[in-house]
Amino acid sequence: MDIKVLGPGCPRCEQVKNLVMEAVRETGVEANVEKISDTMQIASYGVFGTPAIVINGKVKSVGKVPTKDQIKEWIS
């Protein structure tokens, strides 16, 4: 599984990255988690609000901090 957390490095972006890492650990899913802060790369996903989560190429969340349970649903 390929998970990308998109954001410039703001506190909310870091919070989302930490929630994703916790969800991956707790579910035991094998995943490559990558933080992307380059604005051109972020825009290439059609995302213009951060933080955002992209799982296997599909945008799952934009401009908000999802709950850990939501993230677990997406990766299960």
Image (cartoon, rainbow, N blue to C red):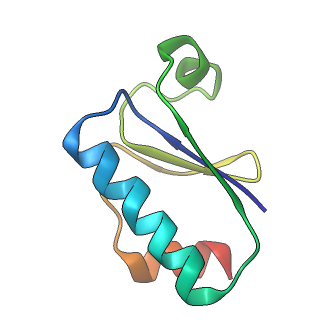
Determine the residue located farthest toward the top in the rendered image.
40
The residue at 38%/62% (across/down) is 18
Whether residue 15 is visible, yes or no, is: yes
Q: Position of residue 43 (x, y in %)?
A: 55, 19
Q: Position of residue 11 (x, y in %)?
A: 20, 43
Nearer to us in this view, 48 or 32: 32
Q: Position of residue 12 (x, y in %)?
A: 24, 47
Where, by quadrant of the figure, is residue 70 drawn?
bottom left
Q: Quadrant of the N terminus?
A: bottom right
Up-down: is 66 above or below 16? below
Whether residue 10 sits left or right of residue 38 in the image: it is left
Up-down: is 75 above or below 69? above
Nearer to us in this view, 42 or 20: 20
Where, by quadrant of the figure, is residue 36 drawn?
top right
Determine the residue located farthest toward the bottom in the rendered image.
27
The residue at 48%/15% (across/down) is 39
Nearer to us in this view, 23 or 46: 23
Q: Position of residue 48 (x, y in %)?
A: 42, 24
**How many dots with numbers?**
0
Q: Quadrant of the C terminus?
A: bottom right
The residue at 37%/56% (across/down) is 16
Whether residue 64 is visible, yes or no, is: no
Whether residue 9 sits left or right of residue 75 in the image: it is left
Whether residue 36 sits left or right of residue 11 in the image: it is right
